[in-house]
Image (cartoon, grey):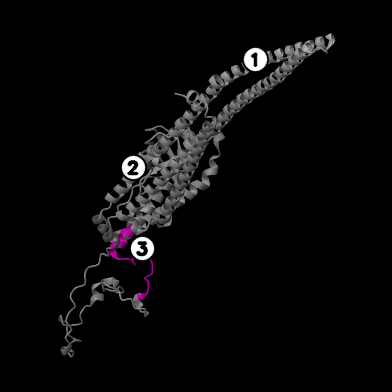
Amino acid sequence: MDWGTELWDQYDIIEKHTQSGLELVEKYVKFVKERTEIEQNYAKQLRNLSKKYNLKRSSKDEPECRFSSYQSFLDILNEMNDYAGQRELIAENMMMSICIDLTKYLQELKQERKTYLMEAKKAQQSLESTYKQLDSSKKRFEREWREAERAAQYAEKTDQDINATKADVEKAKQQAHMRAHVAEECKNDYAAQLQKYNKEQNQFYFSDMPLIFNKLQDLDERRVRKLAQGYILFSDTEKHVMPIIGKCLEGITKAGTNVNERNDSMVVIEQNKSGFERPGDVEFEDYSQGINRASSDSSLGTPKGPMDLLGKNKSKNFWLFSKRSKKFTPERITPTVTEDFTHLPPEQRRKRLQQKLDEICKELQKEVDQSEALGKMKDVYEKNPQMGDPASLASQISQTSQNIERLRGELNKYETWLAEAGGRGDTVRYKTHTFNNNGAHDGLSPDGAQSDESTPDPSQAIYAEFDDDFEDEELTAPIGKCTAMYNFPGASEGTISMQEGEVLAVVEEDKGDGWTRVRRSNGDEGYIPTSYVTICLNK
């Protein structure tokens, strides 16, 4: 069944129905746009919330950050940030695949409908014009036929009139004959116009209008089919990111299961254990033997109080609960912070000394690596003067050597203090290099003795290695790697496409906006959604 057959006389209904269908598409597009605005606002609020409660960079070294409950809370904030990114992706995909696509399709339908309605009006106007011509010829035929009848009656009356002359009778007959001839021509014209109108009317109702109505029916059905696809996309767009949203929620669940209350308690102990011994019993002071107290060496002599039991920490209050008196007392004076951390309890002092040692070792290793690089560079300059002047590196080599000596001194100093505090002094071993007069670098052990490792003679391999290093410095060094969990088209400007399972180099971390900058092995760079990959940063 089609509109051209069943609704041949319902032009107004069809026009109204097709217009209503287009208005429904417009209404749905507006609905989806408002939905995308809600998603974008929701994502923005989630990001702001995550940023508000996330620890600042300066506070990430606070003692509380070592607790599993704090780390899990940070994980939850990161997952919420990724979740917000997925809500933004939903809004972006809905806008691209539904709003923009439907709006473009709607304009095409409007133009097509307008063309069909213009064709219908044109056919209607043509039929009306033909009908006017038919009506005009009909009226003319009616008028001329009456005139011919009157002329015939007059000629007959004149012929019967005995008083009429032969000329009058002849004239009347000629007039009647002429009128009859004109009436006959009008009759033939009327018949021709009637045949023409009937033919056009048949063409109009059985061919032209049914064809136009069927085209409008096809247009309307395509409109309904496209709208149905938009309805499905409304759901599929969100279904597409549900696996990633599920991973975000799983991450939040995992953050909860990672909380270990026992370990948190051990961290509290590790961070705050003083290392002091508990105070012993207070000795009895017998005032009844006050006469002999000055010369007595017995146990009833001057007792050792809590301050004596605490040894060198006499200035510390031995009470478990400090008295919050506002009155100024010597005990309330903040102890002076010293370089060897003697102001701290023994246990905390050992930990701070060990931490300081680790920091010095890392800094020393950095200087050693720089010294080695300068040595290689100097070797290359000496063998290839066009690359640079070896003398230009003298100041850097000298400064690096001074830094190494300074750090060695600090390392020995803190190792001595740690030994005094009862620590083991476990530090990271490092390899240093010194320079001879020719600029070659010699491997030394931490104590300055010659190491077993001998430095290979510089060759073209060193030049090639330096050249590779020089080329790498032109690009930002990667800070880690990431593996794609999902496909990403990278259609937007500044993004890069990736396939599931593809390994990329991480160039820049996510700064809170849900995007990570990566690089392929061929040098292509761009941004990808952080939640689409698993990231492993270099330590």
Amino acid of disc 1: Ala
| Pointer 1 residue | 191
| Pointer 2 residue | 246
Q: Up-down: is 17 above or below 190?
A: below
User: Which label's residue is closer to the chain start, 2 or 3?
Assistant: 2
| Pointer 3 residue | 340
> Toward which corner of the image does residue 209 lie, by quadrant?
top right
Residue at the image position 37 percent from the left and 47 percent from the top: 79
Amino acid of disc 2: Gly
**In whole angstroms, how far apart are the C-alphas of marks 1 and 3?**
126 Å
Range drawn in magenta: 332-353
Amino acid of disc 3: Asp
User: Which label's residue is closer to the chain start, 1 or 3?
Assistant: 1
> Toward which corner of the image does residue 177 lie, by quadrant?
top right
Residue 444, labelled with which disc? none
- Which element is circle 1 on? helix
- Which element is circle 3 on? loop
> Where in the figure is residue 342, as x and y percent of width and height?
33, 66
**Which quadrant of the rendered structure holds the C terminus?**
top left
| Membership of 347 in magenta stretch | yes
Q: Nearer the viewer, residue 319 or 251?
A: 251
* Residue closest to the far front: 162
Residue at the image position 36 percent from the left and 70 percent from the top: 335
| Circle 2 residues within 10 Å: few <14, some 14–19, many ≥20 | few
- Which element is circle 2 on? helix
> Where in the figure is residue 484, as x and y percent of width and height?
38, 36
Judged by depth in the image, the label closer to the viewer, 1 or 2, is 1
**In whole angstroms, how far apart are the C-alphas of marks 2 and 3?**
51 Å
| Membership of 23 in magenta stretch | no
Cβ atoms at labels 1 and 2 below 8 Å apart: no
**In whole angstroms, how far apart are the C-alphas of marks 1 and 2?**
81 Å
